[in-house]
Image (tube, grey):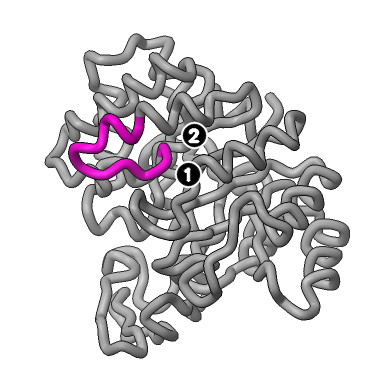
Amino acid sequence: MKKIDAHTHLIQNICGIGSKGELRPLGKGKAQYASGDIIQLIPEEYGDYSLTAETLIKVLKENDVEKTVCLQGNYAGFQNLYTYESQEKYPDIILGAATYDLTSYNRIRIIENLFDKLKFKVIKMEMSNGSGYMANHDTISLDGDLMHEAYKMANEHDLVFVIDIGRPGNNCYQIDNLANAIKKYPKMKFVVCHLTAPQHNQMNILEENMKKLNFDNVFFDIAALPNNTKGQYPFIEAQKYIRKAIDIVGIDKIIWGSDFPSAMGYCSYKESYDYIENSSLFTDDEKNKILYLNAKRVYFNE
């Protein structure tokens, strides 16, 4: 079955900063925060200090994935320019997304370079309090002035607006504010990451979120859903979450993504799509849309 991976990351150099401070590489894919915490940022088989475009493409080809959308993952640090170079080098395989700090003093110059000069077509805003905007800034409203500056800019540039709002229960998790903001940009495509990131035993939260965000221009990637639900392959709870989402918002809104490479610390790359492809909860037509056609339409206008 054809596939497009709509949620991957490139890491030229580990340079992240999160709620635990700056992140330094240790080798073998490990990294350490200023707090002393050590994490396996990149599965060892994919890189010591970086995750290159060539490594990503090798994995895609091994799994018959046609192309990918490389989002910015703040946990590793902004990788805008490396993502751009990779997109230019492999234009038939990689579509890159860019990001910026909402409060950067020179953000206008950054925006002009990324979206006017380099002409990125996708923007990714990570708002989580783990490694996103609210990890190192005061809490802001997703329906506030700073965010509307970004929404308006993206709308004027005809960008796909990808947003990660963190996990339920945190200050960054603002479903109502996000819904209110989206209503003001009915012609711009929004993609909400991780199916709004429901955790284990949070079907009620998922159902409520899908109803609140059920707009014609809102789509959901399902990256790292197995990780969030913490089940074992074939990730039955994750399958049920996807089924519920389809029943509420429709099959045309659900987009597969792997969250490569970090999510592969929990499940293999093959398992990240296999649990959908081999599921009895979805028809072949639904699987084709989740794994391929929806991403093709939303990101590539095909």
- Percent position (x, y) of residue 151? 73, 49
Determine which quarter of the picture holds residue 21.
bottom left
Residue 35 covered by magenta stretch: no
What secondary structure is marked by label 2?
strand
Is any part of residue 89 visible from this angle?
Answer: no
Quarter in which the C terminus is drawn? top right
- Percent position (x, y) of residue 154? 77, 48
Q: Are marks 1 and 2 in contact (CB under 8 Å)?
A: yes
Foreground residue among 142 and 40:
142
The tag on residue 215 is none
Q: Amino acid type of disc 2?
A: Phe
Foreground residue among 191 and 287:
191
Give me the residue at 26% from left, 27% from top.
239
Residue furthest out toward the left? 232
- Percent position (x, y) of residue 159? 74, 44
What secondary structure is marked by label 1?
helix
The tag on residue 220 is 2
Give me the residue at 32% from left, 84% from top.
32
Determine which quarter of the picture holds residue 24.
bottom left
In the image, taking residue 34 as reference, residue 109 lies left or right, namely right
Q: Which residue is mark 1?
A: 193
Q: Is residue 90 above or below residue 207?
A: below
Give me the residue at 17% from left, 29% from top.
236
Determine which quarter of the picture holds residue 155.
top right
Residue 196 covered by magenta stretch: yes
Task: Report how far apart the C-alphas of labels 1 and 2 lie in the structure.
Answer: 6 Å
Is any part of residue 31 visible from this angle?
Answer: yes
Give me the residue at 55% from left, 54% from top.
71
* Total labels drawn: 2
Q: Which residues are magenta?
A: 195-206
- Percent position (x, y) of residue 67? 54, 40
